[in-house]
Image (cartoon, helix red, strand yellow):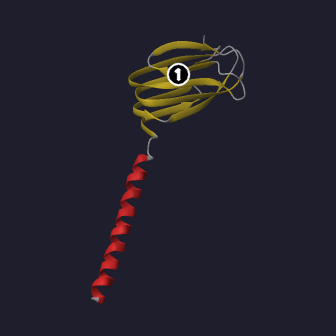
């Protein structure tokens, strides 16, 4: 009987380790709520994203000059996004929650580094923030 007790302990320990590993695997899968599948471009001319899934925050910084403007386009077939455009430490020049589809122009009245934040909520679509320089017009 001594041999069976030893094997039973080993089997119980192995079963416990397998259960623990399975629970960790399942819990790790639950923690992957931040997802982005798509393309992202950011540079001196603007910030663009096209995505089949956006379920996280994406950001970009643009140096803008007084007199510039941002052509903003938000287009979604699923979900929604929260958008914020502004300078650090100041009130945003634009903030929209639960955005679906919109096109508008933001006039830049102060030179500085502008932070653009787009947070998706099960969103599918695209966004663009295109810089139009005062000198281009």
- The residue positioned 27% from the left and 88% from the top of the image is 1
118 over 11 or under it: above or below = above
94 over 113 or under it: above or below = above
In which quadrant of the rendered image does the C terminus lie?
top right
Instruction: Residue 24: name its quadrant.
Output: bottom left
Residue 41 point in image, percent of width and height: 50, 32
Name the residue furthest top. Answer: 137
85 over 104 or under it: above or below = below
Residue 22 point in image, percent of width and height: 36, 59
Name the residue furthest bottom. Answer: 2
Q: Residues within 10 Å of mark 1 (few under 14, many from 20)?
A: few
Answer left or right for 133 relative to 21: right
Residue 53 point in image, percent of width and height: 39, 34
Judging by the rendered image, the residue that carries numbered circle 1 is 97
- The residue positioned 38% from the left and 53% from the top of the image is 26
Q: Nearer the viewer, residue 109 or 121?
A: 121
């Amino acid at each position: 009987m001594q041999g069976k007790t030893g094997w039973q302990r080993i089997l119980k320990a192995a079963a416990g380790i397998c259960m623990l590993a399975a629970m960790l695997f399942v819990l790790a899968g639950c923690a992957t709520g931040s997802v982005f599948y798509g393309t992202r471009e950011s540079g001196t001319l603007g910030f663009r994203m096209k995505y089949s899934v956006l379920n996280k925050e994406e950001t970009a910084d643009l140096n803008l000059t007084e007199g510039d403007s941002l052509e903003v386009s938000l287009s979604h077939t699923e979900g929604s996004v929260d958008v914020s455009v502004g300078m650090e430490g100041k009130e945003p020049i634009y903030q929209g929650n639960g955005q679906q589809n919109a096109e508008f122009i933001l006039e830049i009245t102060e030179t500085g580094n502008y932070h653009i934040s787009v947070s998706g909520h099960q969103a599918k679509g695209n966004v663009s923030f295109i810089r139009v320089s005062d000198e281009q017009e």
